[in-house]
Image (cartoon, rainbow, N blue to C red):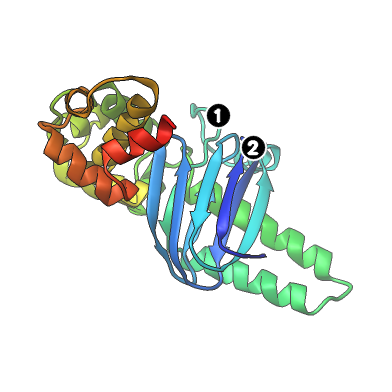
Amino acid sequence: MRHAPGSREAPPLPYHLITFTLDAMPSLAQKRGGLQYDGPMQRGDITITPARHADWRLWSGPCHVLCLWLEENYLQEVAAQGESPGRDELEIVSRFRVRDPHIEYLAGALLTELDRPSDLQQLTIESLRTVLAVHLVRHYSNLDQSATQVNGGLSPAQLRRAMDYIHGHLEGPMDLLSIAESTGLSSFHFARRFKRATGVSPHQYVIQQRIEQAKRLLISDALPVGDIAYRVGFSNQSHLNHHFRRLVGVSPTQFQNKAQV
């Protein structure tokens, strides 16, 4: 699929989406499941959007990607054939930017098959679909936490606990140790796995969420910018101004004035 520079907002859908980058992009912003990522994408970079997750994307240059959809029910059937006694219902883990040689090989095989139609094309595509589904269940789901952690990420439950802690403590001081403790990990292991799962460090993510909350307050409340800075966890207005301008491109005052026009 090729797209001109633009944006897309998709509602929650009953299938998992694997997006394989075919040409480098200077910048791709993504938001879903309370997480966000903004950065360049290289050929071979992969994003994974779980079923029933609203997904927003903004790309600054031409976008050339291969999109692979897997029905939620189909992955449930694949997972049911494995041996995972006592596990919860299947959950695929969201990924913003990962490299996976196995998925890269499958994407290449699929592109080759699509370029040379044959009587066996449908059978080949179905076979690739099955292999991809098994790979996702084994390495990007809650049914195998060890595989998820070997890949450097957090389990879905750990990621939810970290998100819940962060969003529940945006207004006050927050340290890495407290967030890590909510997941049962050390600060060192949590920081590495959080960045692997979300594409940003815990510190960067907290700042992003504080800026998002500041934007909501600037739009909805007639509060002075200084008061908003304290309400979203910044120690003073200058810190809010610095990070707001860096992430949004304008000052909080400029953003507020424009929103109120």
Q: Is residue 209 visible?
A: yes
Residue 211 sits above or below residue 96 on the image: above
Q: Which mark is residue 76?
A: 2
Q: Is residue 186 above or below residue 95?
A: above
Residue that numbered label 1 is attached to:
89
Q: What's the CA distance linking mark 1 and mark 2?
A: 8 Å
Question: Is label 2 in a helix, a strand or a loop?
Answer: helix
Q: 93 or 218, which is in the foreground?
A: 218
Along the viewing direction, whichever of 78 and 105 lies nearer the viewer: 105
Position of residue 199 measured from the top left corner of the image (x, y, whole percent):
34, 52
Residue at the extreme right of the image, as rendered: 119
Q: Position of residue 14 (x, y in %)?
A: 67, 37
Q: Identify which residue, 155 or 212, lies in the foreground.
A: 212
Q: Quadrant of the C terminus?
A: top left
Which residue of the protein is positioned furthest toward the front in this rendering? Answer: 261
* Relative side of 187 to 46, left or right: left
Residue in the image at 65% along x and 73% along y: 109
Q: How many marks?
A: 2
Does residue 208 appear left or right of residue 95 in this picture?
A: left
Going from the N terminus, do you reach mark 1 or mark 2 first? 2
